Image: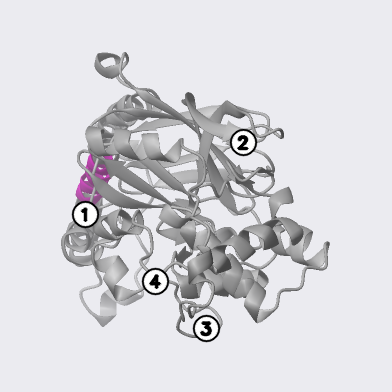
Amino acid sequence: MAGISLLSGCFWLDGPQSTFDPSGPVARHQQDLFYLTCWVSLVIFVVVGAVLAYAMIKFRAKGPAEEHMEGPDHHHGNPLVEISLIGASVLALVIIAIPTLRDIWYSYDVPAADKANPYEITATGYQWWFKFDYPNETAQTTDPTGKPVNAPFSTANELVIPAGRPVQINLRTVDVIHSFWIPKLAGKVDMMPNRGNHLWVQADKPGYFWGQCAEFCGESHAVMRFRVIALAPREFNDWLSHQMEPARKVPAPRAADAGRPKAQFAAYRTFRTNEAGYSDAFDASPLDSWREQQKAPADEDAALIAKGRELFNTKTCSTCHTIRGDGYVGTVGPELTHVGARTTIAAGLLQNNRDEIHRWIHAPNDVKPGNTMWVQGYVKNNIRLTAEDEDALVNYLESLK
């Protein structure tokens, strides 16, 4: 078993959610413990298998005459053998138990040597997405009168952290039990209703990591995903400074441009049911794709974006989503102030581009059955969008870099 696991880790299990390719100290400790358990199990398997094979060969019937002979009388076994087997079993358990307890304590809290320098984030699970609060940061926004004010800073579904630094993640949930899992950085820890929990992670170097809810939590549990982006300290601080600013404003079209033709966009694709939402180019280098995503589109249509901003309010999207600076302060759905700068939408399920945004807006229940946006938004509020409405909303959301 250990040999198969080793070969699998080297040659096959190298996907984005493989635990055989750790990128941080917590995941590395857990992988070492897994391999130790495999090796101990392999030794037990070999010894037991060898004794069983020896007994089967040595005491097998030697011919037809012995096949119908009565077996030997049963009597008490050899005490020395029995005590030795018990001792060997206890030793095997001790060999596994000591590092298991050590790694439980290690993964539970930031080690004492790094205790003074962890970065704190709170992750909250919803059906079916993740909210990330940065409690030590304040973002810029405006109050209902338009006066600039500071507010707690949060984002959704893409957790950006500083590389090479411990990150303490407080785990919460607002509904059912979820399980927070970043396979290459740390193991699974549950988010329990009415009970605080936490874990810590550290990325060895800048990178892009896949995350997943690992506890069945409803109809769309399998597509409750998120991403972790680890950045070098300077790049992280630059990202943080930009994210805490209000929503980006695209300048209104000039009067001189009123008669000029508007930008023409390619027709939106039609997707098959359960079709994957990522391109090969994105998967080839996701961190580079993330950096490219921070740039504003070159062919923005200011009039279309302005229409999308208006529709976001009139179609009641603003009752569920926050967009700082545009006056929208909903708390039911993900925060969207800089959603255009994220590489994914729909809780890590779809790549963030025009086609996929349109796919999500056009038929959210086909993408993620039972989601709140569909049930509490489209159905409850009887939202109807024309093709022109969808195009405007796509362009508005894409502009929010």
Determine which residue is flagged by label 4.
278
Residue type at mark 1 is: Ala
Q: CA distance from mark 2 to mark 4?
A: 31 Å
Q: CA distance from mark 3 to mark 2?
A: 36 Å
Q: Residue at x 49, y 84 (%)?
A: 269
Tell me if mark 1 has few (under 14), some (14-19) or many (20+) residues whose alpha carbon lies within 10 angstroms of its own. some
Q: Is 55 rendered above or below residue 204?
A: below
**The N terminus - image quarter:** bottom left
Q: Nearer the viewer, mark 4 or mark 1?
A: 4
Q: CA distance from mark 4 to mark 1?
A: 34 Å
Q: Nearer the viewer, mark 2 or mark 1?
A: 2
Q: Residue at x 45, y 72 (%)?
A: 277
Secondary structure found at label 1: helix
Determine which residue is flagged by label 3.
271
Q: Nearer the viewer, mark 3 or mark 2?
A: 3
Residue type at mark 4 is: Tyr
Residue reaching furthest front? 256
Determine which residue is flagged by label 1.
2
The answer to whether any part of residue 85 appears in the image is: no
The front one of 328 and 145 is 145
Tell me, yes or no, whether the highlighted magenta stretch contains residue 38: yes
**First in sequence: mark 4 vs mark 3:** 3
Is residue 137 toward the left or the right of residue 396 in the image? left
Residue 55 image position (x, y, % from top left): 23, 59
Tell me if mark 4 has few (under 14), some (14-19) or many (20+) residues whose alpha carbon lies within 10 angstroms of its own. some
Determine which residue is flagged by label 2.
192
Residue type at mark 2 is: Met
Tell me if mark 3 has few (under 14), some (14-19) or many (20+) residues whose alpha carbon lies within 10 angstroms of its own. few
Q: Is 396 rendered above or below residue 181?
A: below
**First in sequence: mark 2 vs mark 4:** 2
